[in-house]
């Protein structure tokens, strides 16, 4: 019984030491400046009469909690403040000899501005209360920090999203974006004014490493080979065409298999070259048809001459 009484007394004394009320339990009043050397306590301020209050003046009245250093000669304070609004934005700052008066906003509701690196060891959900990936977003609008790689999911689909800022030798900002769909790098990249799909190093305004499915493709051209039909065009003879094929193994002005495998083809340029060969082939066919018609006429004439000779022989 004696041990129980002694223990109760110790607990009662501890409660008196560590559970103390600040003053009468109410704020110490309205003060003119939150940034001066204040004692530990709870204060009120007003945007119209108090200096050094937080940037949030949605409500002119503000609470201030101060924890002061034990040495009265040192103005080291931990301050926390907020307006009178219900569940409003929360700010804090640590004053050291009056050389720090900037308020730092905690992660609260409303618009928050953070300075410096923010490190989160865990999952972040935007638009969802139970994130299943490092970053889970249920919104079409998302901006992830540059020079960072994050695994994120949208509508239950997981990706690796990499946003990177690259500066070239001229100081021009070049954005690079890459997405990994769990199977292959289905990359979408923006690099120095170029767009790449399926490639992180686009070599033209639009570079696609894969199949393009489109209803229509329009190519602007600088010329078209209708010059083949002009009188001044010197069409090569079939003998010349044959000689070129024997020596080179392909038609003149048409790239070889080796060149195509190495460099690919320019779609518009190749269509124009093929049309040139079609038009030349058309001229060959026209000439051939004329030759055939002449042969037919000549053959008919010769047949008539033979018939005439037979008639004369028979009449004699």
Image (cartoon, rainbow, N blue to C red):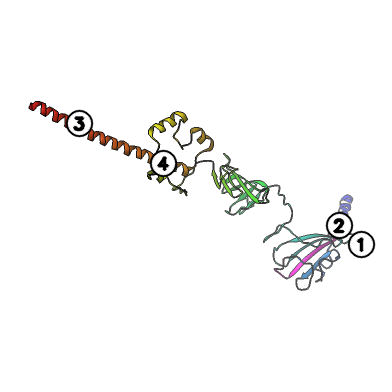
Dot 4 corresponds to which residue?
Answer: 276
Pointer 3 or 2: first along the chain: 2
| Residue 118 locus on image (x, y percent) | 72, 52
Callout 1: SS: loop
Instruction: Say which quadrant the C terminus sits in.
Output: top left
What's the mark number on residue 302?
3
| Residue 243 locus on image (x, y percent) | 42, 30
Q: Give the quadrant of residue 32.
A: bottom right
Proximity of marks 3 and 1: CB atoms separated by less than 8 Å: no
- Residue closest to the eye, 173 or 315: 315
| For residue 300, side relative to residue 120 (left or right) | left
Measured along the vertical axis of the image, is residue 265 above or below residue 248? below
| Residue 267 locus on image (x, y percent) | 47, 43
Dot 2 corresponds to which residue?
Answer: 12
Pointer 1 or 4: first along the chain: 1
The residue stretch that appears in magenta: 55-68
Proximity of marks 4 and 3: CB atoms separated by less than 8 Å: no
Pointer 2 or 1: first along the chain: 2
Callout 4: SS: helix
Spatial CA distance of label 4 from label 3 is: 39 Å
Pointer 4 or 2: first along the chain: 2
Q: Residue at x 14, y 28 (%)?
A: 309
Pointer 3 or 1: first along the chain: 1
Dot 1 corresponds to which residue?
Answer: 73
Spatial CA distance of label 2 from label 1 is: 34 Å
- Residue closest to the eye, 176 or 12: 176
- Between disc 2 and disc 1, the foreground one is 1
């Amino acid at each position: 019984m004696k041990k129980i009484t002694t223990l109760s007394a110790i607990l009662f004394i501890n409660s008196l030491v560590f559970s103390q009320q600040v003053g009468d339990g109410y704020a110490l009043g309205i003060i003119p400046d939150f940034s001066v050397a204040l004692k530990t306590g709870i204060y009120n301020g007003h945007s119209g009469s108090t200096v050094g209050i937080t940037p949030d003046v949605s409500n002119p009245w503000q609470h201030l909690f101060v924890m002061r250093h034990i040495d009265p000669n040192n103005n080291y304070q931990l301050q926390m403040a907020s307006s009178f609004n219900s569940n409003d934005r929360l700010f804090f700052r640590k004053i050291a000899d009056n050389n720090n008066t900037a308020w730092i906003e905690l992660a609260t509701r409303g618009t928050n501005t953070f300075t410096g690196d923010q490190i989160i060891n865990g999952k972040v959900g935007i638009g969802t209360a139970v994130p299943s990936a490092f970053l889970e977003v249920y919104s079409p609008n998302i901006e992830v920090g540059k020079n960072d790689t994050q695994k994120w999911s949208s509508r239950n689909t997981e990706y690796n999203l990499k946003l990177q800022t690259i500066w070239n030798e001229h100081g021009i900002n070049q954005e690079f974006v890459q997405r990994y769909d769990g199977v292959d790098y289905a990359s979408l990249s923006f690099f120095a004014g170029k767009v790449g799909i399926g490639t992180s190093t686009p070599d033209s305004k639009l570079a696609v490493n894969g199949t393009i499915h489109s209803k229509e493709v329009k190519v602007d051209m600088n010329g078209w080979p209708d010059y083949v039909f002009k009188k001044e065009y010197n069409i090569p003879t079939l003998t010349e065409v044959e000689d070129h094929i024997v020596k080179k193994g392909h038609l003149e002005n048409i790239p070889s298999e080796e060149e195509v495998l190495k460099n690919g083809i320019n779609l518009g340029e190749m269509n124009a070259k093929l049309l040139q060969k079609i038009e030349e082939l058309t001229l060959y066919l026209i000439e051939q048809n004329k030759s055939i018609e002449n042969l037919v006429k000549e053959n008919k004439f010769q047949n008539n001459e033979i018939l005439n000779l037979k008639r004369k022989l028979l009449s004699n």
